[in-house]
Amino acid sequence: MPQEVCAAIEEYRRFCLLAISGTQLAVPSDAVDQVWHLHLTFTRDYWQRFCPEVLGRDLHHEPGDAASSALMRERYAQTLACYAETFGPPPEAWWPSTRERFAARRRSVDLRRHWLLPRLRLTLWIGGTAALAAFILALPSPALALPANPLAWPGKNFLLLYIVLMALGYVATRLWRRALRVGPQPASMGQLDRFETALLAGGPQRVVDAAVAEMLSTDQLLWDRDKKQLVQAPGGAAPVEPVLAGVLQELQRNARPPLSPRGALSDCIRQLGDRLQRGGLWLDPDQSRRLAWRPMLISAGLLLFGAAKLAVGLRNDRPVGLLVILMIMTFFGSLGMALAAGRRSRAGEERLSELEQSLQHSVRAPRSSDLALAVALGGTGVLIGTAYAGYHRQVHASDSSSGGDSGGDGGGGDGGGSGCGGCGGGD
């Protein structure tokens, strides 16, 4: 039996165990649901052997209700959390994020009349282009005919060389930055709270977003869809935690996201950074500046190399448009990497990786109680498909994609049950 088929059956068996042992309805992923559908077609095996002999009770498959899509998302998140507690982190291949789970739309296609082509991924496209350029450049015949001075090479050969150097420069920059992430000797810091995690993962703005997400999930803040702004819930008690109190102070200045980490909120974030720095997870300002700007010397050298060829091309009245585009890509790419370098030390990178691994189910399908931690690790994108998606769209106004919010939720059934969007149910 193929390995993928065995894995699908195993995930289905695990889901069935969760469905009959939990106190709430369990919701499967789309792939697991397809296995369940297939099993249900073998009615005698499912109802006369599997349910009574293996599960010890009936497990009904209920139809979905699109009006309860928010509830279904919450139950899917709860299912992933129970999975993590019982079996460990759920594999993403079988248990995708909430957005993917409820955005999938299957269609029947006649393969005799149509071809199916997967969408190209940007990283695959860039890597393939660089590999192709390296392969062409390594061909023996053109290489033997080229002069020793690359500035005297024909334009297309030089462009291929430049693309290869861009790829090598990217790798070298990443390695240099990794070497510079050596912070002070880490002290025992214990478990990070949600706001320390947010600062470690995404910087000051992530702390603000995590705090807002927590206050939205606990109804301390409300989202006004018409005005596209945050509103403090009437009659609510003032928050005790300094970060949450700082968010309310900033809300008095500006109710429309994104809220800025300034004033009292900035002081709170600075204290969070000091704790991370004492724990060896955060670099001091001087170290972070070196981390950001020193590796840009690699890009600067590549730009000087390109500028020399640009001068040769202009002097000889040759077209240089493609070279200019590549140089612009080099500059802004290296600048973007510098600005995104952050202040995490190597120990901080390892700690963040551990958190992402152990809490990946919370990011992929956050429960209401985990929303602040999910935003801390994954950013406001995890809000897509929730009642607070408007906050994400306002923070990232250029990202207008929040599709795939349809879906249903199944009702309860005797002896356990589960919901799935628009599926038939067993009786």
Image (cartoon, rainbow, N blue to C red):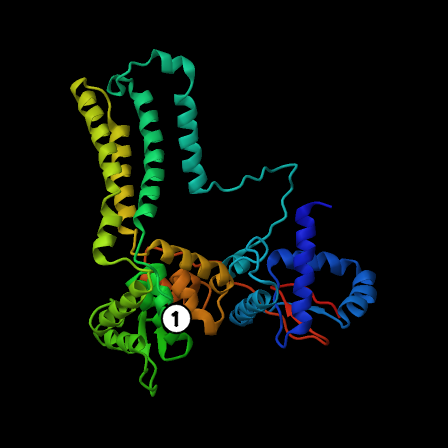
Q: Position of residue 245 (x, y in %)?
A: 28, 78
Q: Which residue is mark 1?
A: 193
**Left or right relative to 362: residue 250:** left
Picture mark count: 1
Q: Quadrant of residue 303?
A: top left
Residues 208 and 272: in front is 272
Q: Residue furthest left?
A: 315
In this view, 416 is above or below 281 = below
Binning the other alpha carbons within 10 Å of mark 1 as few (below 14), some (14 to 19) or many (20 upward) gives few
| Numbered disc 1: secondary structure | loop
Q: Position of residue 384 (x, y in %)?
A: 43, 62
Q: Position of residue 208 (x, y in %)?
A: 31, 68
Quadrant location of the C terminus in the rendered image:
bottom right
Q: Position of residue 281 (x, y in %)?
A: 34, 60
Q: Residue at x 29, y 17 (%)?
A: 154
Q: Would you say residue 217 is visible in this rendering?
A: yes
**Left or right relative to 49: residue 390:** left
**Left or right relative to 358: residue 313:** left
Amino acid type shown at disc 1: Asp
In this view, 161 is above or below 327 = above
In this view, 390 is above or below 313 = below
Residues 114 and 163: in front is 163
Q: Residue at x 35, y 25 (%)?
A: 160
Q: Quadrant of residue 268?
A: bottom left
Q: Would you say residue 387 is visible in this rendering?
A: no
Q: Residue at x 41, y 13 (%)?
A: 141
